[in-house]
Image (cartoon, rainbow, N blue to C red):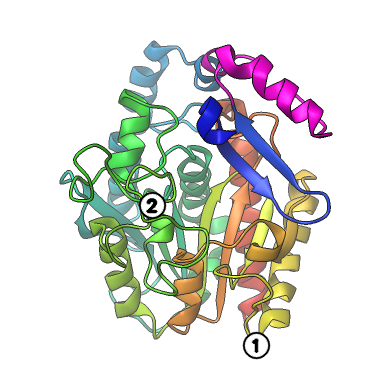
Amino acid sequence: MEKEYDVETWKSRSGFDSTSDLLVAPFHADDVINQLNSSGARIDVTISDLGKAIEEEHSFIEGDLEKLTVRKSHGMSWERYHRIKDIYGYMNYLAGYKSDICEVINIGKSSEGRKILVLKVSSKKGARTKPGIWIDAGIHAREWISPASVTYAMRELVENYEDHPELIENFDWYFLPVVNPDGYEFTFTENRLWRKTRSKKSSIRCRGADPNRNFGYEWGGLGTSNEPCSEIYRGEKAFSEPETAAMAKFIEDISSTLKVYLTFHSYGQYILIPWGYRNNKRPEDYNEMKELADLMADAIKKEVGSKFTVGNSADLLYPAAGGSDDWAKSIGIPYSFTIELRDTGKHGFILPAKYIKTSGREVFSALKAVSAHLTP
């Protein structure tokens, strides 16, 4: 059906109550619905007009941005979705505003030459004497809520430092809010639903690879494709993409002190635990990891009321080899999780900007739970 009617699967869940979110062109909608009805599937239309939803997602009065920039010396508002220039501007703003605890580190360049920037937050800048916590977002370009929520958490950690000084006193924090800057920019200028990188080397006709199938652990396995036009194309080889290669090299350089790896995606409201490369495969310390995942889910529910489902990523969703969380776990980082942010399907990837702050609070409450659990 996917090829016959050009159906795109946004999200699927395995198990006895398996569900799938499908994107269907209007001129194929009746045919697809009829075919699904004949198979006995239950159908709910969650987004009836995707174009309209995209317009509503980031509605914003442009004049407000200029006022905000003048007033705050940066363009971030967390009331709209921001392009890479604003996000990098905010990281540099924090490095200047709180230069005693913040520094911006350029870890490499994307296929199209954009910088890949990390913000390190530490009470001992430059040193590596404390346990480290890594946070990344924006691996998949269209998942706008992940960079927005992670930068909100950055703000809470740094600008409201006095409210929780123990977070920075006890840990070094590393934030990579946009892993895939080329793809992210492309979603603003050309194709809102673009997922992959924008590299050219894999195919003349189709560009990019799925960064979250490109990491070097069990690369090329289940849930990946060797077809360059596929949304889950794994790349020519592990770390073929400059974005994943730069990120991996930096993490490997600091891995001796990293205790936690957190990668934020959307959507579904899950906290996912390795291994993701195949079903019924779990790390020996799975129960310890699940304990922390449950604490994060509890903290989110207490803060906002949202329910996040905890479990093994392959068993809850589907096998997907070459993921960043599996790779991070494989190099010895004790706690590695993928967190799928809101929502559960009503808006999918096109989450209205009015939910950014709430999602940011969910992220920050999870970070506080991690810190509390790992503080001696």
For residue 255, which numbered disc appears in the image?
none
Residue 168 vs 129, above or below: the answer is above
Q: x, y (%) of residue 10? A: 58, 38
Can you say whether 102 is above or below 56 in the image? below
Instruction: Read off the residue under disc 1.
Output: 284
Question: Quick check: is 200 in the magenta stretch?
Answer: no
- Crowd tier of the residue under label 2, counting other residues whose Cα lies within 10 Å: few below 14, some 14–19, many 20 or above: many
Membership of 32 in magenta stretch: yes
Residue 7 in the image, given as x and y percentages of width and height:
55, 30
Q: Can residue 6 be seen in this view?
A: yes
Magenta stretch? 24-52
Which residue shows up at 69% across the image and 35% down it? 345
Query: Residue 233 has which mark?
Result: 2
Please state, as top left, top right, bottom left or bottom right, where the N terminus lies in the image: top right
Q: Which of marks 1 and 2 is in front?
A: 2
Q: In which quarter of the image is residue 56?
A: top right
Q: Nearer the viewer, residue 285 or 6?
A: 6
Q: What element carries label 1?
A: loop
The amino acid pointed to by label 1 is Glu
Dividing the picture into quadrants, the one containing residue 244 is bottom left
Q: Which of marks 1 and 2 is nearer the N terminus?
A: 2
Identify whether 255 is placed above or below 19. below
Label 1 close to label 2 by CB (< 8 Å): no
In the image, what residue type sits under mark 2?
Tyr
Query: Is 119 left, or right, of 261 in this rendering?
Result: left
The percent coordinates of residue 252 (x first, y second) are: 33, 78
Quadrant housing residue 374: bottom right
